[in-house]
Image: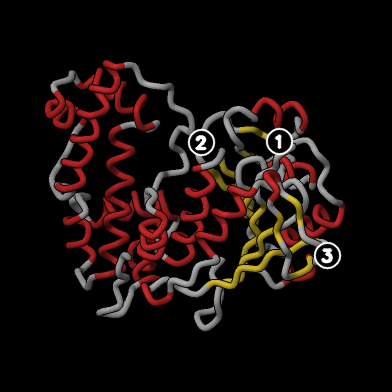
Amino acid sequence: MAPTAAAPQRIALLAFPGIRGFDVSVVHEVWGVDRTDRGVPPFELRRAAPDRTPVPMRGGLSLTPDRTLAWLRRADLVVVPGLDDHLAPAPSPVLDALRHAHERGTPIAALCGGAFTLAQAGLLDGRRAITHWNLTHLLRRHHPRVTVVPDALFLHDDNLWTSAGTAAGIDLCLHLVRVTHGAEAAATIARSMVTAPFRTGTQAQFIEHPTPRADRDADALAAVREYALAHLAEPHTVASLAARTGMSPRSFARRFQATTGTTPLHWLITQRVAAAQKLLELTDHPIPEVARRSGFGSEVTMRQHFTGHLATSPRDYRAAFRQPAGSSPIAR
């Protein structure tokens, strides 16, 4: 997915009538703002459509394309916004352009209801996909050849990315920055957007509204997560974290998953991987020291989890994303 070191990553925002203004704004905020002064790599974001006619959107908005669909042949990544009418047929040139982009091996990311556009193009046939939790039944009914995953924030199958609704589109965009340019670049963009820098794609997208008792539990769980993040190098178990909340380990694990959408241990490993990424990018600590500081205890354990989460080794990650001394981005 990564472009050459000297050239900006080329992002094609696919534009056609009916796309959602929110998703367009997310794509522009992630890839359309120049943050090179803060250490973020340069991006070239283009709005590609069948022609240069302004694209109408809901609420009296419109989007003016600056490239035709032919520009998709140059793109390093194609992003498909969600839709206002999920069953409206996309223009045939758009569907053809998506098929050709996939045949060329270009990664394609669909936000929220953008999965319906990929499904119309036949790209999701026989593949796993996700969309907004309230639309999964619709996607399954109208596109029965798609394996609709019932609950996730985003997922990847054969160079095709799909995401759940609204905020999950932000998670997917930041994840795509992270896997291409490293955790610190994604974190810098997230700080600028005042949003969470990392939520794993397997996290549940829908959590029931808490009751007053659950609110009290959530406060305790937030405090224990903050403690664990401040003491990642220390050993933690479900029992030791539960003890800090006054809950039994069983109640703690159940409430933790209900509140966050993931298990305590999976959350902890994810945070340790993220901490290791930052240490590998920004420090010269030896790999065993990175493993110790991020809480894995040993290089072998860190390598196992690192590879499982990121499909690369700590050493290869450092070689790809190590930042020169003094180049750490500054949040503003």
User: Could you tell me which secondary element the residue under label 1 belongs to?
Assistant: loop
Q: Is 15 above or below relative to 90?
A: below
Answer yes or no: is residue 80 visible: yes
Q: Which residue in the protein does label 1 denote?
A: 146
Mark 1 surroundings: few (<14), some (14-19) or many (≥20) residues within 10 A: many
Rendered location of residue 331, percent (x, y): 31, 65
User: Disc number at residue 152?
Assistant: 2
Q: As rendered, which of 211 and 93 lies closer to the eye? A: 211
Label 3 is placed on what type of residue?
Asp
Q: Is residue 189 left or right of residue 15?
A: left
Answer yes or no: is residue 157 visible: no
Q: Which residue in the protein does label 3 denote?
A: 51
Rendered location of residue 297, percent (x, y): 18, 51
Q: CA distance from mark 1 to mark 2?
A: 15 Å
Quadrant of residue 24 within the rendered picture: bottom right
User: Disc number at residue 25?
Assistant: none
Rendered location of residue 289, percent (x, y): 17, 62
Quadrant of residue 184 within the rendered picture: bottom left
Q: Is 120 above or below relative to 322?
A: above
Mark 1, mark 2: which one is toward the viewer?
2
Q: Quadrant of the C terminus?
A: bottom left
Q: As rendered, which of 49 and 325 lies closer to the eye? A: 49
Mark 1 or mark 2: whose residue is earlier in sequence:
1
User: Could you tell me which secondary element the residue under label 3 belongs to?
Assistant: loop
Q: Residue at x 38, y 74 (%)?
A: 39
Q: As rendered, which of 134 and 331 lies closer to the eye? A: 331
Q: How is the image coloured?
A: secondary structure
